[in-house]
Image (cartoon, rainbow, N blue to C red):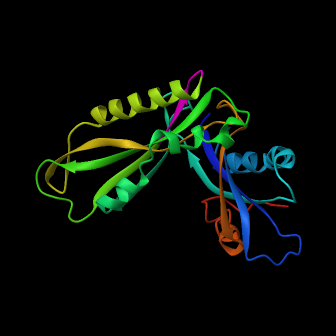
Amino acid sequence: MPWFLACLMTHSPANDGGAVMVRSREYWCVVLADDNDAAYQKSLSLRGKILNQLSPETDGRWVVDGVSTLLALANAPAAGGEILWERADLYPSEVDERIKSKEFLRVFSSEADSQEGSDWYLCELIFAEVHDTGTHGDTVLVWVNSYLIEAPDKESAYSLAAELGSREALELGSHRCEGDSAHWEFRGLRDMARLLEAPGDGAILWFDERILPLDDVRGAVPSPATLGLRHLDLT
């Protein structure tokens, strides 16, 4: 049975209902399901669990808007395994701006110290393509790959993340880009967060919080058909 990674959008509406900007959280969860349709339904069934978690942590009402992302994972979520990835062409200065030193990572913030969590962590590792011959032009091809780490504490998790980055860069090995010889270089961490729960069927792993326009929150939730699924009842 395949594993799926799902993101559910939530927001806290203003008391007067007229706010343009709202507080939003994107909750990332993993589920086991027979197919995309079953995974979608199972992800939606986590709405109650998410709202129960939000209630003691935050003030005001919260709404779960729906599933914004549904990805089939190549492997079961495990320590050292990749769970999410992003690709971008960036200018060199933009690459540097995305790399955080240890003290600015989410897991080392004072707010993180007060939150309960598991012995699992998510680390976002930045890899940049380096051309041995030729050039990629003015920009750099960058991958931000997110991995799961199991560790007894955040210091150990940070060390394991750095080791994983160095090892993965070597394992990616030499390749060719538009006929040129190139290789991948580990540049550092974009972020690291402690998981709310250990990876397992129906587990809520982490959330990202932002202030967004309400229209953007609603627009981030596509129709089931856009996700490649048949129409499902969202009520």
Span of residues in magenta: 146-152
**Vertical comparison of 216 with 65: above or below:** below
Residue 137 shown left or right of residue 124 in the figure: left
Position of residue 7 measured from the top left corner of the image (x, y, whole percent): 65, 52
**Vertical comparison of 131 with 227: above or below:** above
Could you tell me if residue 169 is visible in this image?
yes
Where is residue 62, by image quadrant?
bottom right
Which residue is nearer to you in this view: 29 or 209? 209
Position of residue 50 measured from the top left corner of the image (x, y, whole percent): 79, 47
Asked whether 151 falls inside the magenta stretch, the response is: yes
Dominant SS type (magenta): strand
Could you tell me if residue 30 is visible in this image?
no
Q: Residue at x 61, y 65 (%)?
A: 226
Farthest residue in the left direction?
133
Q: Residue at x 14, y 54 (%)?
A: 179
Quadrant the C terminus occupies: bottom right
Which residue is nearer to you in this view: 98 or 68? 98
Which residue is nearer to you in this view: 216 or 115? 115
Position of residue 86 measured from the top left corner of the image (x, y, whole percent): 45, 52
Farthest residue in the top direction?
152
Position of residue 165 measured from the top left corner of the image (x, y, whole percent): 38, 35
Q: Residue at x 38, y 50 (%)?
A: 143
Where is residue 35, by image quadrant?
top right
Where is residue 12, by image quadrant?
bottom right
Quadrant the N terminus occupies: top right
Residue 110 shown left or right of residue 97 in the figure: right
